[in-house]
Amino acid sequence: MTNYVELHAHSYFSLLDGASSPDDLLRRARELGMDALALTDHDAVYGAVPFVKAAREIGIRPILGAEMTLEGDPTPHHLTLLVEEACGWANLCQLITLARHNAPKGNALLPSDALEGHTKGLIALSGCRLGEIAAAIRYNDPQTALKTAQRYRDLFGRNHFFIELQHHLLPHDDSLTADLVALAEQIGVPYVATNNVHYARRESSRLQDVLVCIRHLKPLEEAASLCRPNSEYYLKSADEMCALFADYPDAITQTRHIAERCTFDLSFGLQELPTFPAPEGMSAHAYLQKLCVEGLVTRRIEPTDEIKRQLDYELGVIERSGLANYFLIVWDLVRFARTNDILCQGRGSAANSLVAYLLGISPVNPMEHDLVFERFLSDERQVVPDIDIDFQADRREEVIQYVYERYGNEHAAMACTFVTFRARSAIRDVGKALGLPPEVLDRAARTIDTFKSGRIAEVGDLDAIFGSKATFDQLADLADQIDGFPRHLGIHNGGMIVMGVPLSSRLPTELATMPDRYVVQWDKDAIEDAGLVKIDILGLRMLSAIAEAKQTVEAITGQPLDLDELRFDDPAIYDMVSAADTIGVFQVESRAQQQVLPRLQPRQFNDLIVSISLIRPGPVQGNMVHPYLRRRLGQETVIYPHPLLQPALEETLGVVLFQEQVLKVARDLAGFTGGQGEGLRRALGSKRAHEALDRFHVAFLDGAARKGVENPIADAVFDTLRAFGGYSFPKSHAAAFAVLVYQSAWFKHYHPAAFYAALLNHQPMGFWSPAAIVNDAKRHGIRVLPVEVNMSAGKCTVQGGAIRLGFNQVKGFGAVAIERVMETRMVSDFCSLADFCHRTQLPQRLIENLILAGGMDGWGKTRRSLVWELGKLDYRPDTLPLDLPEDTLDLPPVSLLEVMGIEYGLLGISLRDHVMTLYRPQLLERGILGNRDLERCQDGDTVTVAGQILVHQAPPTAKGHHFITLEDEDGFINIIVRPDVYAQYRRVLRESPLLVIEGTVQHSRGVLNVIAANASALP
Ligand SMILES: [Zn+2]
Ligand SMILES: [Zn+2]
């Protein structure tokens, strides 16, 4: 135990003003023998939870606090605040909230009078050189310094205010320290030393400078005044600090006294939830029970003994966890959505719960699919689970608004996210700070294949771009170091937290980019680790598309359509899915899925669950996919690692596919309880839980031994679980998604025009581009009609069985432009370009896009002459009668290739023939094959194929293999590129839109790939 404790330290959560993670700081503190450490990031407690968590693991006592920015003249002041006890935490949160709400987004400025009434439980240190007192001394204003010090002393109390001394070997540090000490003695307050730490080790001072440059958008050479003057801002040892403050030994011992006083322990547990207004003074629990019993009727479930037992059990666990109110809040949201015709359904582990099913939150009955409730909630589980609900994306906002209205702005906020540096942005930002020219950085960033962390140094040809290896090395090294650092704050996609008490008394909130929107200073992990519960209000575009397709069909047939009536048993749907005719179908449309489906041959709902779950990193990495498929096809016998595992793994033919099976395996083989199994599953999914995993390993082997399982078998099973990791769907989640697979497949099969139109209206979504969707529609015999100024609606619509593209498909046409066109057209059709311009008064740019997209072809003029005419119109929005131009030039028509290029650029779709048709004669001559020819090829044939690149993927699980999907007028050609071939043809594969590939055919069970040997561009 040292006599010095650092009480003023910034982590990278000071956002571009700190160069170490909380973890690094703590590890360094331990190396230096400190037993406590304070975290004082600028105006924030972003890092509080990870700091506390890591501190506990490392065995250091965490002290929480923040360095506040106060209003000041001429510049803001700094003040260091440390949390002594619980009421101090509440005050700190309120102060940070006040400071954040008093400044533009991303900044903070505490009003000078705001400290009053918010000082209890806090210890204040007078701050760095920018502290109000130090600044006054530096400006030779001892009177102000004295008055200010007295004011703070009276505000916080004699035992809660300390003069802060810092010494960074700067010219005036000696005299400043002496003056501060004299002042402290004069007014009778103690003084204390800190080092205003900005990085754990001296080596990181360069990185700190670069971060400051990124913050101020300036290159290093211009930023000298903004950067710290030297590299003394690292975490110093007690010896170093004692030496610096040799004249003031009390300044050192005081750190320990303060550290010992700060006993606040951040352990939240479930927040006070708003009390749901249950009728007739019923308790939340009783009301929940009543709703569930009603749910049995609406869901048409026979209340058997088994059902009743499960329901009682679940309600018991929910009550003991204090979550009855939470379920009611979520139920209320779903009810709001239903009554407003907003499609929604729960996803994730909530679908394990019968209660969630009965309340209409989740779409599947867990009893029918053998789902495990403990995966969602159990008596032993420490962490409270979130309920995640998908709402149709285009109406999610209404649901969020509802939450704000119902609980109030002070009680509801979104979780934040930290937007972090990734390979590409790190290279760009660091490069700018180092003063490298933008062109070089553009090329460098573009050349980087991966956004994945920790891969920057592996990229090869950057050297060539920079000329000098040293420059590149420096760039790569710094970029590598900040890879994964938080850069700025974002808003979490739908995670909402609601509290019965005002949020700001528990954790700070700040402004989000959206007006009237607040985010809390914690991200979803921190919220979960602290034991708070949130509701995830997610937007799912597929739900929007299904809702719209449903409406279209209802409008066409005049009959209401109840999707809940679908029985998931239509052979025609399974035929289509088995044939991998799945473009546009939820979750099973990807290229990888299309490779699996013909082998899997789904015939029932459960097969859809399996199909979704197979193509996940867990089963792929755990090598489950091929054994599963072989066993299903009867090419391999189903074996179990141990007979005890048969019940758990029978449904998946002896392999582990679902997260829940981890729990079942642990239960059946090693006697784990549900809660232990869940702990194991989480450890498997966490990159950092090595120690926890080792403990589970031992417990697993012990438990298995007690059941008489031989050690090598138990060990092998554990290894399988380890390879599987946590990267898979829970079966409950897959089951909820499978409902949407079936519904979307059903629409594709029975109402294709309505379905494709809806897909186009809700892009971007899924795996394929709008162009691929349109081509798929055409292959299914659906006519797709162009945008037409008098026929199109805002959205894509179904007209006489054909899809009519809407104005929303034209580049630049947003809601306002569309509304203007539709409104003006109500009076009468447009009869000419001038008429259109005159009546809509839309910007010229938009009208030009509409012309070039073919929207005005109906008037019998070429697009080129219409554009010419548009240019001649003296046309500005709000100009009255437009003169018709007299001369119309006859311009040469644009070539087909040009038209297609323009349409593609403006629409993302070309309705002409596929671009490859233009090349077909040439390709035929060269003996180059297309999709249609390929079907006749045998396994092992050498072929040359060509097509337009539709998809290029290199999933991390594929060990360097790249997967490219080419498209031509007849369909797709799947290309697999091995790592060595990719290295050789990287540029052409990355940069050419049209490719010629020579390679070998791999053809088995209806799945056809070409293994590339070489590649060239189609000119
Ligand atoms: Zn400061
Ligand atoms: Zn500081």
Image: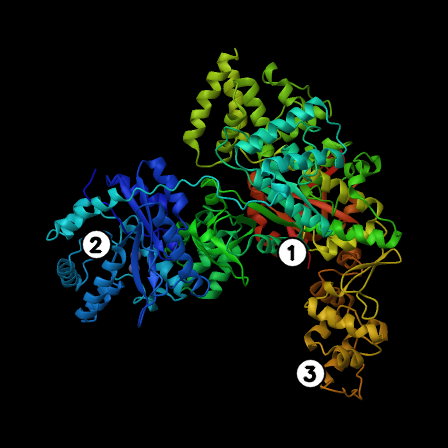
Q: Is residue 1001 visible?
A: no
Q: What element carries label 3?
A: loop
Q: Which of marks 3 and 2 is nearer the N terminus?
A: 2
Q: Which mark is residue 398?
A: 1
Where residue 257 appears, as percent x and y from the top left, is 21, 44
Number of disc labels = 3
* Position above or below: 288 against 466: above
Give the spatial CA distance, label 3 vs label 2: 70 Å
User: Residue at the spot x=63%, y=56% of the render?
Assistant: 397
Q: In front: 478, or 572?
A: 572
Q: How many residues crowd around disc 1 within 10 Å: few (fewer than 14), some, or many (20 or more)?
A: some
Give the spatial CA distance, label 2 vs label 1: 51 Å
Instruction: Find ligand 2 in the image and state its quadrant.
Output: bottom left
Q: Which of marks 2 and 1 is nearer the N terminus?
A: 2
Where residue 19 appears, as percent x and y from the top left, is 35, 52
Q: How many residues crowd around disc 2 within 10 Å: few (fewer than 14), some, or many (20 or more)?
A: some
Check disc 2 and report the residue beneath it: 158
User: Residue at the spot x=57%, y=55% of the render?
Assistant: 404
Q: Nearer the viewer, mark 3 or mark 2?
A: 2
Q: Which amino acid does label 1 sit on?
A: Glu
Q: Which of marks 3 and 1 is nearer the N terminus?
A: 1
Give the spatial CA distance, label 3 vs label 1: 36 Å
Q: Nearer the viewer, mark 2 or mark 1?
A: 2
Which residue reaches farthest top?
708
Q: How many residues crowd around disc 3 within 10 Å: few (fewer than 14), some, or many (20 or more)?
A: some
Check disc 3 and report the residue beneath it: 876
Task: Kindly indicate the quadrant of the structure image that contains residue 730.
Answer: top right
